[in-house]
Image: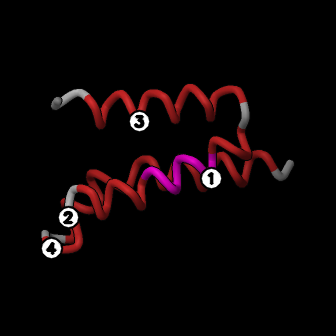
Amino acid sequence: MHQAPALVFIATVALAWRYERAGGFVLIATAVAAFFFFRLYAQTAVAGLIIAGPPSLSGILLLLHSRR
């Protein structure tokens, strides 16, 4: 049960590795879903940055790289 979120993140990274543009959108969507799933809106801002920050930043960077 505790590994389910990690497996979702790993699956999105595997998708992003192959398809940059689709993976970027999926990583951003995963970050938004994690923000609501873990109720990060009710916690401190640091918790939100730790949990949802890396996938959203990775998604943004992938989208920027795929434009090239």
Which residue is identified by label 2?
A: 39
Q: Residue furthest front?
A: 1
Label 4 sits on a secondary structure element that is helix
**Sooner in the amino-acid sequence: mark 1 or mark 3:** 3
Q: 6 or 56: nearer the eye?
A: 6
Q: State which region is magenta.
A: 24-30
SS under mark 2: loop
Give the main secondary structure, helix, strand or loop, of the magenta stretch: helix
Instruction: State the residue position of label 1.
Output: 25
Q: Nearer the N terminus, badge 4 or badge 1?
A: 1
The amino acid at mark 2 is: Arg
Residue identifier under label 3 = 9
Which residue is drawn at the image coordinates 73% and 46% (left, top)?
A: 21
- The residue sitting at 31% across, 31% down in the picture is 6
State if disc 1 and disc 4 touch (CB < 8 Å). Answer: no
The amino acid type found where label 3 is placed reads: Phe
User: For residue 14, which quarter of the picture?
Assistant: top right
**Amino acid under disc 4:** Ala
Q: Is residue 16 above or below residue 44?
A: above
Q: Residue furthest left?
A: 43
Q: Position of residue 36 (x, y in %)?
A: 30, 64
SS type, badge 3: helix
Which picture quadrant has residue 4?
top left
Could you tell me how far apart the alpha carbons at marks 2 and 1 are, in whole angstroms? 21 Å
Q: Are marks 2 and 4 in contact (CB under 8 Å)?
A: yes
| Mark 4 or mark 3: whose residue is earlier in sequence | 3
Q: Is residue 48 left or right of residue 8?
A: left
Marks 4 and 3, how far apart in space?
Answer: 22 Å
